[in-house]
Image (cartoon, coloured by chain):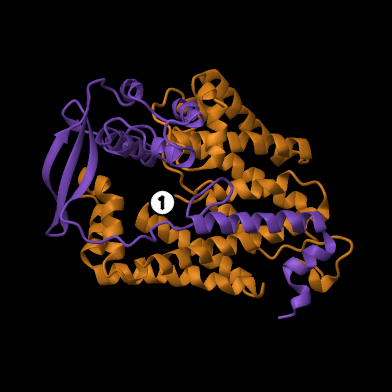
Amino acid sequence: METSRTSPEHIKRIIYLFLLGSWLLRLYQGVLLYQLAGASFVSVKADNSFWIYHALQIPEYILGNQFLGLFLDLIWLILSISGLISKSGRKKGLLMFAVFINYYIIYHSVATHHEHTLNGILFMLLLITISNNKTFILCFEALRYYVLFVMFSAFLWKLFRGSLFEAGQMSEILKHQHIEYITSYPDSGYSNFICYFISKPIISNLLWYMGWITEMIFIVGFFTKKYDRWLGILFLAFFVMNYILMNLCFIEFCIFLIVFWPWRLQYEDITDNQLY
Amino acid sequence: MNIENTYMIRLYRTHKKLFAVVTVFILFQLFFTIKGVETLPFFNYGMYSTPVTKQNTYKNISIYNGNKKMPYNKTGISAYFFGYQLKYYDRFLLQDSTDYVKMTIESRFGKGSKLTNYLCPLLTNDRSCIIDFSNWLNRIGEHKSKKIYRENYQWVKNTFKIINKEQIH
């Protein structure tokens, strides 16, 4: 059965939708640039790119000027809405990319912890800066391999660092992860739920191994695209479980899910059986 | 598997510039993975991969608004973000108000070198940040009088039991 081709514009719209969602989430969380103004500590860690940006004093200038922060936040909002309702141009994409990178560096510096929740949007943003159809499709495919690398390398890290062989690994992780919540709300249902897993290291480690096996399975994607739908489901399930057990919200990271969707992208000099 | 149809071969045949970009990216990613450090956009996804052994005590940094404990998720700001700030403050005090990034700069460019002396004030926190931290804290929650405690807990009978606490702010 012949189905209609997917236009890169469809995918770009999804990326802009995630950008809008991310903006709203971060407004709610109180971590947009204008809300971060006046924050005290920054940590650039060992990241060379952060070092260069901070050496140029750009983050300090923005953090010291709440109106500039608000202005940049509004540009993010306006570009997201604009990208959703109108054709996404290359200039718009490049401006969005610059605004987002700026936010990415400043947020993680001020958080003093360089987490990975925004990495999904960061990498997918490359696509909205591409106007050439062929480059877009090849980059989209490269991003699919990157997502496979993300998941499979997480498996390898656990294997080579030895956390897999620690008997009470998950139980101990849960203690560190939830100590603040459990001591603040000792009688809540969620605290009881987590305490149950902490007190049953064998059961919690089973969940740990399930997560590890899930990450391992992604190696399949390097050899075939036949199981991409299943990989997509596993990807989603992994981060839903992450949210339930670890209370880590990776909804922005889940933009990576779209690389497993069976889009019908095509450029002129590629045959049907090579369709991505 | 048909080698001719692998992504990198197809990329080389159809888009040489992109092939070069992807190859350089892979090489840099490999380099930073082996080095074990992250530099945007080369990330290492090794979260929770370090073995975590059972401990006698577990540390928590708590904040009290007046005499009432203020859970992180009641601060009006992301609980994780708030927690990171408190933990960083605690660590900063434990290191005698020295930013550990200073050690990284010194190890890369040499102690007392011109570049180290130039970069340190731009990239690290100093004692003045403690005052900024107090001001920032005052903006959160209803009351200005906030106390921060470094608390130690033990895991006893399926719950955390407090052992001791020390006021650090």
- In this rendering, the answer to whether A48 lies above or below A230 is above
Q: Secondary structure at mark 1?
A: loop
- Which residue type does callout 1 highlight? Leu
Q: Colour of chain A?
A: orange
Q: Is residue A214 above or below residue B66?
A: below
Image quadrant in which you'd find residue A167: bottom left
**Residue with the mark numbered 1:** A248
Drawn side of residue A68 relative to residue B135, left or right = right
User: x, y (%) of residue A118?
Assistant: 53, 46
**What quarter of the picture does the N terminus of chain A occupy?**
bottom right
Question: Where does residue A242 sit, x and y in percent of width and height?
Answer: 41, 58
Residue drawn where x is 47% and y is 58% of the image = A239
Residue B3 in view in this figure = yes
Q: Nearer the viewer, residue B24 or A182?
A: B24
Quadrant (top left, top right, bottom left, bottom right) of the C terminus of chain A: bottom right
The chain coloured purple carries which letter?
B
What percent of the width, then of the height, locates residue A13? 70, 46
Residue at 65% across / 75% down in the picture?
A223
Left or right, residue A84 beside residue B142: right
Is B168 above or below relative to A218? above
